[in-house]
Amino acid sequence: MENIAFIGLGNMGGPMAVNLLKKGFPVSVFDLSAEAMAKAAAAGSRAANSAADAASGASVVISMLPAGKHVAALYLGEDGLFAKLAKGTLVIDCSTIDAGTARRVAETAAAQGLAMLDAPVSGGTAGAAAGTLTFIVGGAVEALARARPLLEAMGKNIFHAGGAGSGQTAKICNNMLLGILMAGTAEALSLGVKNGLDPKVLSDIISKSSGRNWATELYNPWPGVMENAPASRNYAGGFMSELMLKDLGLAEETAMQSHAANPLGALARNLYEEHVQQGNGKLDFSSILKHFHALD
Ligand code: NAD
């Protein structure tokens, strides 16, 4: 059985590590937050003093960190983990980061005889807790075959997007579309309500018509339309607006680097930028509705 080091035990990484433990994998953990460490230790993991300590003796290292700079700092350079890992160690980075950094880190890993996958996830904190995440994987087929039992302990759907960095590219395409669709759904609902329609009735109509999308079907931004959606609990929990802003920024960067047009993604990024600056960064991203409609 693989011996796992798990680095980054936040909203996503914490429950993911717990699901590995539940499936019987030995897991050593490290996070800068003492609170996150205490939770993971209570679930049965070995609490390490540093990332290098967690990784000593591990056959697989999994990371779930905020952004590309954290991932590069963890693995690269003289003090980075790559300088310390045994050849043949499998490294799986599940953070959402820019594809350029993901490729650079994977190239360095390969040069040191390590296998590396970028494996960002979709499914949010609820999916992380339930073990139903979707993994969008970039890297070699053989490395994915080895990683599969671990990914299956944390998720339900596993897609191979292509070579190194492809997982990040596919994830960013999906999230750019999600940001555009959520803002568009909020705009359409506001238009209907300002013209006398009931938001629930309008949502039901759209859900069975050609404008339907994930937001109208499962994650309605209007408070009270869907009992379980973050909109019905003052936009608490879910996927924070500041993380959506980060992903829309990554999409724009990727578009610039590849000379792809992204006018709608850029517009959505501007909307989320203003929304976050107005103090809504910690609210679920469906709170973009407030940009279109004043709520009581
Ligand atoms: P988070 O901020 O809750 O967790 C990040 C954790 O990393 C924190 O506990 C922090 O202390 C730790 N950390 C930072 N630098 C570290 C280091 N050098 N060594 C050890 N630990 C370190 O963030 P999250 O919501 O868990 O998101 C993690 C990643 O997953 C992000 O890239 C995010 O974009 C992505 N993601 C999040 C969601 C979501 O719904 N929250 C959904 C899909 C993807």
Image: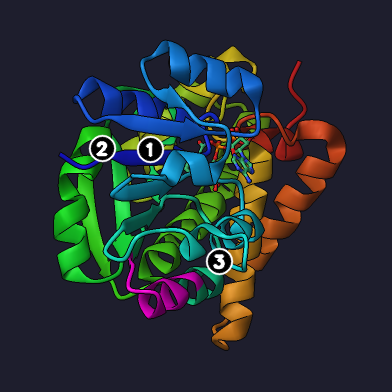
Q: CA distance from mark 3 to mark 2?
A: 22 Å
Give the residue furthest to the right. Answer: 278
Q: Identify which amino acid the numbered label 1 is placed on.
A: Gly
SS at mark 2 in the image: strand
Color scheme of the displayed model: rainbow
Labels 2 & 1 near each other (Cβ < 8 A): yes
Instruction: Identify the residue position indicated by label 1 in the image.
Output: 123
Asked where in the image residue 136 lies, by quadrant, the reply is bottom left
Q: Secondary structure at mark 3?
A: loop
Q: Which residue is mark 2?
A: 155
Magenta-tinted stretch: 105-115
Spatial separation of the CA atoms under disc 3 and disc 1: 19 Å
Residue 98's mark? 3
Dot 1 falls on a residue whose secondary structure is loop
Closer to the chain start, of discs 3 and 1, is 3
Occupied quadrant, residue 285: top right
**What amino acid is labelled 3 in the image?**
Asp
